[in-house]
Image (cartoon, helix red, strand yellow):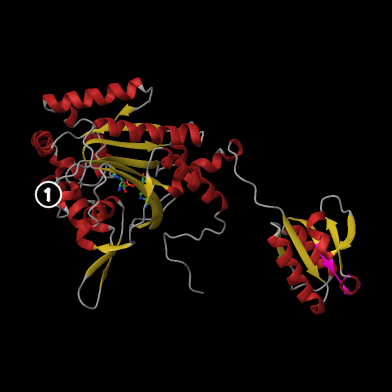
Amino acid sequence: MISRVRGTEDILNLHFHNFVLSKVAHHLSRFNFTEIQTPILEQLSLFVRSLGEHTDVVSKEMYTITTESGEQLCLRPEATAPTMRAFIENGIQQIPWKVFSYGPMFRHERPQKGRWRQFSQVNIEIIGSASLAQDVLLISLLDTLFGDAFLLENYILKINFLGTKEDRELHKTGLHAFLTKHEKTLCETCRVRKEKNILRIFDCKNETCQALYRTAPKITDVLSAASRQEWDEMRSMLDLLSINYLHDPLLVRGLDYYNKTVFEFSSSDLGAQNAFCGGGRYDHLSVEIGAKQNYPSMGAALGMGRLLMLVEAVKEKLQVPVQPALNLIIPMEDKQHTIALMLAQHLTTQGHCIDILLEGASMKSMMGKANKMGARHVLIIGHDEQQAGTVTIKNMQTSESKTVKQVQAGDYL
Ligand code: HAM
């Protein structure tokens, strides 16, 4: 038996999944976001240049493919760089470009609850706006999506401010001195990161390193006057909109392209992999991937698998559409198969949900199967019904039976 690839999953019924997804899409369309789609396959260099070669995603988790002609491709690990690529490559003039997309992402991580190697994200971007009010707009629309549309209660929003390149340079100097003082406490990877890409130390999962970093210099303490003003203004906008948040000075978000605002929604109901949505501002990504100018931008992605786990727990409070009631046609013998097919065609055109039981040994076993399938009615066609042009309809809840003309079956149902 060939099994599925580790860290991937088979979703055997998409009904609830599609309900959640359509609610997200509906919410985003109310905020004037348009749905787009970009390819799953991209050039490897798109991510190396944008996410950064020392990030976990690029250094350890990429699914890469080298084609016969030597092209280096990969299965996309995220959708922000592809969305920016699509914006530039298609010469989009509409600014800000407010778009969202949905689809699978691939990261070769260690699989565990809530963490897959293939997982789906709803990715939301506002490309071409420097206004921090956009950051607040996006955070606020996500907060209403989770709190009001999905009625989630147990989640928190963490925010940090990474300032400008100059702010980060200043922060890095202080951080470097701090880490040198505590060099012995650092794990092997953090020692390398300290020299190569120092902010990536915060992505370390080692508890000893994390404990040390809680006492490290904070970026928000070294912001320039202009950055400090922006950070203060953003927080006051969040306060005025009554959005609850927590300032987490250790939040840097694992990808190199961020500046200024970064944020994450997490829930203790999810276990160790508790972040179900994360994002931030990325004002220089377009130039990093080869554009002639910067397009200041902002976005977020929500992990569909993790969101589904949270919404599943409150689904009784939501109006999940019920699936249409099933009506099951049972032809007693092969001779009645054609009539069953014709009746099915007729009834589905009238809008009924129909299935036909074509493989049954005895009436008893077929009725048992109908019960298991949750049929509301069974429509039995045997020799007598075939001769008379009728069908015997049994209501599976009341056990009442009635024989009606085949042409009237739809009205009866
Ligand atoms: P990210 O934090 O890497 O950000 O991923 C966003 C969300 O995707 C996470 O909060 C999590 O819910 C989900 N996720 C990530 N990895 C996995 C995994 N292995 N298994 C299951 N779920 C996962 C980004 O991807 C950025 N592109 C977000 C963004 C958009 N920033 C600006 N615009």
Q: Position of residue 200 (x, y in %)?
A: 20, 45
Determine the secondary structure under disc 1.
helix
| Vertical arrangement, residue 35 with respect to residue 30, above or below | below
| Highlighted magenta segment, given as a residue range | 379-385
* 413 in the magenta segment: no
- Residue under circle 1? 196
Q: Is residue 188 left or right of residue 302?
A: left
Q: Position of residue 283 (x, y in %)?
A: 19, 41
| Vertical arrangement, residue 281 with respect to residue 79, above or below | above
| Vertical arrangement, residue 61 with respect to residue 301, above or below | below
Q: Position of residue 280 (x, y in %)?
A: 27, 39
* 380 in the magenta segment: yes
- The reply to whether residue 199 is in sight is yes
User: Can you say which quadrant of the picture contains the C terminus?
Assistant: bottom right
Q: Is residue 277 left or right of residue 377?
A: left
- The reply to whether residue 218 is in sight is no
Residue at figure coordinates x 10%, y 36% from the top left = 181
